[in-house]
Image (tube, rainbow, N blue to C red):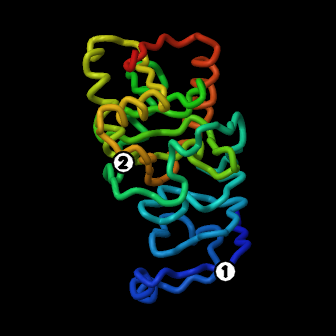
Amino acid sequence: MGVEVAAERVWTAGTRAAAERAPRKTDYRGEDLKHHSLTHTNFSDCDFRRAELDWTSFYRSLLHRANFSSITIQGKEIDLERRAVRVENGDVWDVRQTGSDYVGDCNDNEQYNKEILKGSRRGIVIFHDGRPIGFIKLKGERSFLAVRTVRDENGDVIFWKGMIYALDDKLTQYLVEKSMRFADRSEWRRADIEIAMQEMKDSKKVGADHSFRRNNQRFVCEEKIFERLTRLAERIENGKEKLVDILA
């Protein structure tokens, strides 16, 4: 698939030298996006309507500012707007910039998440406005996988469906610690982000004006996972998945 860019690429001063050393690409299309690191480009105000992305590293790439409508994974077009939601209290998340936290390159992410989505493993499901938005896996790196595309009140994207994220390190650590007392349980572990933030502010783990940052890592490179994410969100919302509230 091609990539339609609606605005000129803007190079930041800090990355200009590195960008000039890299191969010059004025037109990101088709194969050029496969395995290509986009970490040197500021895509502010660009409109990525369609892109074929295969194991593309998004670490510190500012792709949180890009706007997708669909992507193609393993030859199949994925509609990222299916079951997308807008949430209130969007200031819980910092959509202006990524954080500095890093969870590794997530090489085994597909395998672990396929096991989770088949029911052989569980994770921490994060809710926002009472709806599941994704989960943190509890084996290997504590990365977060969005089950749906999530926007704030202004329409700015917080999470893209099927994208792996490194969440705010303080948030991840807090939730993982809270979940440890349920280590012998087989249910999904539920955490409402609004409650987590209030508890962390009350305990002075974060400041009164804190909002959680997140780093885009990459989309999962397995088209079947996207459909399983849709089914998981539906099952949770329909009460067909057992959850234990780790913040209760």
User: Which residue is depicted at the point 59% across and 61% down?
Assistant: 65
Residue 169: numbered disc: none
Does residue 138 appear in the picture of this structure? no
Q: Amino acid at mark 2?
A: Cys
Residue 230, percent across and down?
63, 30
Q: Amino acid at mark 1?
A: Glu
Q: Residue at x 32, y 45 (%)?
A: 169
Relative side of 134 to 47, left or right: left
> Residue 222 placed where, x, y %?
53, 42
Task: Give the percent coordinates (x, y) of residue 147.
Answer: 56, 35
Q: Residue at x 56, y 67 (%)?
A: 33
**For mark 2, what is the residue?**
106
| Residue closest to the eye, 135 or 35 | 135
Q: Quadrant of the N terminus?
A: bottom right
Q: Name the element at disc 2.
A: loop
Disc 1: which residue: 8
